[in-house]
């Protein structure tokens, strides 16, 4: 795609900035190359740079360039069908769905228990819960993202499953997928790692690097998951495809079939992206979590090689600059967690404050809107300096009593 040099005052919303006239490391932007989504980003560019380089045409990417041949047609047939709008505030939606979120959390545990005991899954109940969950994410994704982030689970499998399902449905919403595809995404990513339920607990909780034999056994969770679900009545084909292909990668480096490019179905590619994001941003027995900004950067580096550029860019849009549920440090020295987004103001989300400027816990958890927050009424705008991870400043999000 051709690149054009322009003055920063000529930048407009919708343009894709590919390069700056200064190193990216000297700016607050989290990744190299980004679509301009709001005027605040243009103002930030004007402060930092005299000119930038933009891609021409701006952000219009041909779907067939990413998914050629016969899957390209399928891609075009399901992407962009619908433009979803936020129809409820995050606070209203959290209040409305808190109980259903708790119910689906319990349901995930019951599904695992049923599978271990070789019992039938209550598929109508699963479908009902998924319908309710997708309804909520259609109205405002922030509610389910927030509730899943602060929920304490007794198993990383439960946490991963629900987190992946929420993010996948949110990405599907961003892409404008039809409702039947959102439902399939939600269920398929919820069941993505169901095959791990038959693997030894020692293997799943190992803190040391896996041996070659252990890694080979770990990878069998894909085939195990497909086998388990194939034996159940009523599981949609799209769901099985997600489970089968979420570890495949565009360059053929994935498993179990080393599929390449358009051999990997769209929903499986979405499953792969959210699986990667969840695996690096949530703590593991064998590794510390990375911050959302680092995860975005890692994903950005892998686009075109492991992941579709179109899907990565749309996932970054869905995450927003500071994803809901991410821990952030402010220019005031305060530390908080992003509770929801402000439409059109990606750099100014709503934040629950946890620590004061001296890093002392607040007695309660005040909610602030960064678009108009000025402690002490000084008139000085407060910005997010960086995202941080669970454990920094001794913060454990799941242990906070929100």
Image (cartoon, grey):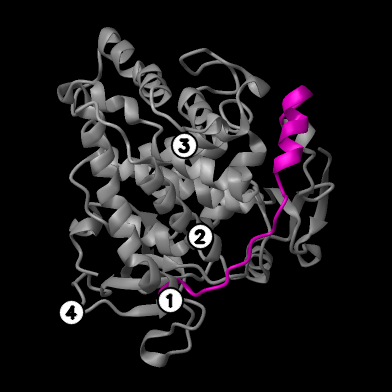
Residue ID for mark 4:
363
Q: Circles 1 and 3: CB distance less than 8 Å?
A: no
Point out the tag, 3 or 2, that comes first from the N-terminus: 2
Q: Position of residue 65 (x, y in %)?
A: 77, 31
As drawn, the label of residue 188 is 3
Q: CA distance from mark 2 to mark 1?
A: 14 Å
Q: Secondary structure at mark 4?
A: loop
Q: Secondary structure at mark 1?
A: helix
Residue at 75% x, 62% y: name it: 8
Q: Which residues are magenta?
A: 67-91
Q: Position of residue 46 (x, y in %)?
A: 69, 66
Q: Position of residue 319 (x, y in %)?
A: 51, 54
Instruction: Mark 4: give few (<14), some (14-19) or many (20+) Cα within 10 Å.
Output: few
Point out the tag, 2 or 4, that comes first from the N-terminus: 2
Residue ID for mark 1:
92
Residue ID for mark 2:
135
Instruction: Mark 3: give few (<14), some (14-19) or many (20+) Cα within 10 Å.
Output: many
As drawn, the label of residue 75 is none
Q: Nearer the viewer, residue 69 or 97?
A: 97
Q: Secondary structure at mark 3?
A: helix
């Amino acid at each position: 795609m051709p690149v054009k040099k322009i003055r920063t005052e000529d930048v407009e919303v919708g343009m894709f900035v590919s390069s700056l006239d200064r190193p990216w490391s000297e700016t607050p932007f989290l990744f190299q190359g980004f679509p301009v989504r709001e005027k605040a980003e243009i103002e930030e560019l004007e402060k930092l740079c005299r000119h930038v380089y933009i891609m021409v045409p701006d952000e219009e990417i041909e779907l067939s360039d990413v998914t050629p041949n016969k899957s390209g047609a399928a891609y075009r047939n399901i992407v962009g069908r619908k433009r979803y709008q936020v129809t409820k505030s995050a606070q209203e939606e959290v209040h409305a769905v808190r109980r259903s979120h708790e119910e689906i959390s319990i349901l995930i545990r019951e599904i695992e228990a049923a599978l271990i005991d070789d019992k039938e899954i209550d598929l109508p109940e699963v479908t009902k819960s998924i319908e309710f969950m997708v309804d909520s994410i259609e109205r405002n994704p922030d509610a389910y993202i927030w509730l899943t982030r602060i929920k304490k689970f007794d198993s990383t499998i439960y946490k991963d499953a629900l987190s992946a399902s929420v993010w996948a449905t949110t990405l599907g919403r961003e892409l404008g997928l039809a409702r039947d595809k959102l439902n399939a995404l939600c269920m398929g990513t919820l069941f993505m790692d169901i095959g791990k339920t038959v693997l030894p607990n020692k293997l799943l909780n190992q803190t040391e690097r896996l041996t070659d034999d252990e890694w080979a056994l770990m990878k069998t969770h894909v085939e195990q998951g497909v086998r388990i679900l194939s034996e159940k009545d009523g599981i949609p084909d799209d769901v099985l495809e997600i489970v089968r292909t979420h570890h495949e990668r565009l360059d053929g480096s994935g498993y179990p079939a080393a599929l390449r490019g358009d051999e990997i179905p769209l929903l499986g590619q979405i499953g792969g992206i959210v699986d990667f994001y969840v695996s690096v941003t949530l703590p593991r027995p064998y590794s510390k979590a990375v911050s959302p900004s680092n995860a975005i950067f890692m994903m950005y580096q892998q686009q075109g090689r492991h992941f579709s550029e179109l899907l990565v860019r749309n996932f970054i849009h869905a995450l927003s600059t500071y994803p809901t549920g991410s821990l952030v440090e402010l220019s005031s020295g305060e530390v908080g967690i992003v509770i929801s987004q402000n439409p059109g103001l990606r750099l100014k989300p709503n934040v629950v404050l946890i620590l004061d400027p001296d890093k002392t816990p607040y007695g309660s958890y005040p909610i602030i809107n960064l678009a108009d927050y000025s402690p002490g009424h000084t008139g000085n705008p407060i910005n997010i300096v960086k995202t941080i991870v669970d454990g920094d400043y001794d913060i454990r999000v799941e242990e906070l009593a929100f």
